Image (spheres, rainbow, N blue to C red):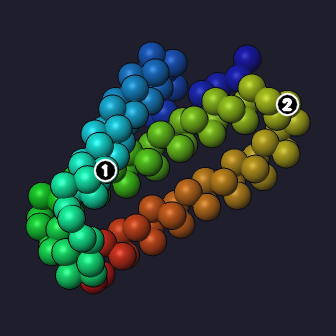
Amino acid sequence: MVLNQASLKRDGVQDYVSLRATAIILTLYTLFILGFFLITPEVTYDVWKALFSNLLVKAFTLLALVCIAVHTKIGLWQVLTDYVKCARTRAVLQFFLYTLAFGYVAVGLFVMWGA
């Protein structure tokens, strides 16, 4: 039996709900950004900077970044346990891919709050 290491509760229902909730939030964020591009006639650096200087946009982006991290962790765990049977290979892949995902989120936070 494979134990679920993706969630703290080690519960498939929790993972299911977490994946769906993060997918909804990421979809809303994508629609928000897409809507911004559609209604803004010309996107310049100043317009983009003004958008992300708004605290609500920063908070929404932070929420989206956290959702990316959660969604990635659970999704990678599910895919790797389904398709990679060797425990050592799976552990190495998980470490590499989790580190890469963490790096993406860290860079996103740095770009968003550092500017």
Is residue 33 depicted above or below 72 in this figure?
below
**Residue 97 x/y as whole percent:** 66, 54
**Residue 93 x/y as whole percent:** 75, 50
Looking at the image, tell me whether mark 1 or mark 2 is earlier in sequence order. Answer: 1
Q: Circle 2 sits on which residue?
A: 85
- Mark toward the viewer: 1 or 2: 1
SS type, badge 2: loop
Query: In the picture, residue 90 is in which quadrant?
Result: top right
88 horizontally vs 68: left or right: right
**Residue 17 x/y as whole percent:** 39, 22
27 horizontally vs 35: left or right: right
- Residue 106 visible here: yes
Question: What's the residue at 40%, 26% (across, down)?
Answer: 20
Q: Circle 1 sits on which residue?
A: 34
Question: What's the residue at 11%, 65% (across, down)?
Answer: 55
Quarter holding the N terminus is top right
Query: In the picture, residue 24 is in which quadrant?
Result: top left
